Image: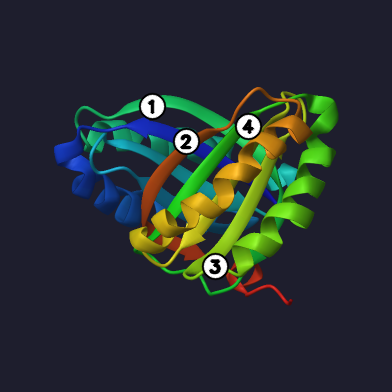
Amino acid sequence: MFIRGTRVQTPPEKIDQAIENFQKQVIPSVRSAPGYLGATLLVDRKTGSGVGITYWQTAKHLSASEQVGIQTRTQAAKNVLGTQIINVERAEVVIMDRAQPPKSGTFSRVNTISGDPDKVDAATVFVRNQVLPLLKALKGYRATIMAVDRQTGRSVVSTGWDTREDLEASESKVTGLRKAAADAAGAEDVQVEIFEAPVVELTAAVATPSKS
């Protein structure tokens, strides 16, 4: 599975407009594309930062959808005045653990690690063997998705939580693992961001809870 993540900056007072545009314009545009597996929007209402993510069955499907991706980004910038496209990233999903079915209105902690391309697999093993067992035991845990860019060594680990309170309560449990995760990936540190997930639409292939 592969993802394309579009990072945007929107005036905070227009976040609701951006959410509506994602629901009514972006998702319908990409839904019919071959290999489409779903879409998620992450937003920070205070700063206006956001990430629109689409999921694709294969690298070929991701590549074939680039044109529709360009169209939806261009249209979003027109529909929501003041919106800026910061960057677009593509990555391979190497971990998809889901304790609960996807649900809009949940919260996500996004950990970004800029590491060594040669250590991507080692970082993946660390997250799977050391981080996941801890997360699964915490209140409000919903999912973990890890995606990597094997060429640059950049990894993103996103964890989903029922409420912001559950997310914040989990912070003390995972802080100590970040340094170890950075070391495993050959990185100096881990960038951490907190988002609301107001829009989540995933197909059954992605939405089914993982077997323990």
Residue 6 is marked as 2
Instruction: Look at 25% across and 32% down and name the residue there.
Output: 78
Tell us which disc is closer to us: 3 or 2.
Answer: 3
**Disc 1 to disc 4: CB gap under 8 Å:** no
Instruction: Look at 35% across and 61% down and name the residue there.
Output: 165
Disc 2 residue type (three-letter): Thr
Q: Earlier in the sequence, mark 2 or mark 1?
A: 2
Answer few, some or many: residues within 10 Å of disc 3's Cα (few below 14, many 20 plus, some between 14 and 19): some
**Disc 4 to disc 2: CB gap under 8 Å:** no
Q: Which residue is mark 3?
A: 138
Q: CA distance from mark 4 to mark 2?
A: 17 Å
Q: CA distance from mark 2 to mark 1?
A: 7 Å
Q: Earlier in the sequence, mark 3 or mark 2?
A: 2
Nearer to me, 91 or 30: 91
Instruction: Look at 33% across and 56% down and name the residue there.
Output: 23
- What is the x, y in percent for residue 96? 67, 59
Q: Check disc 1 and report its element: helix, strand or loop.
A: strand
Q: Which residue is mark 4?
A: 113
Q: Which residue is mark 1?
A: 85
Tell us which disc is closer to us: 1 or 3.
Answer: 3
Disc 1 residue type (three-letter): Ile
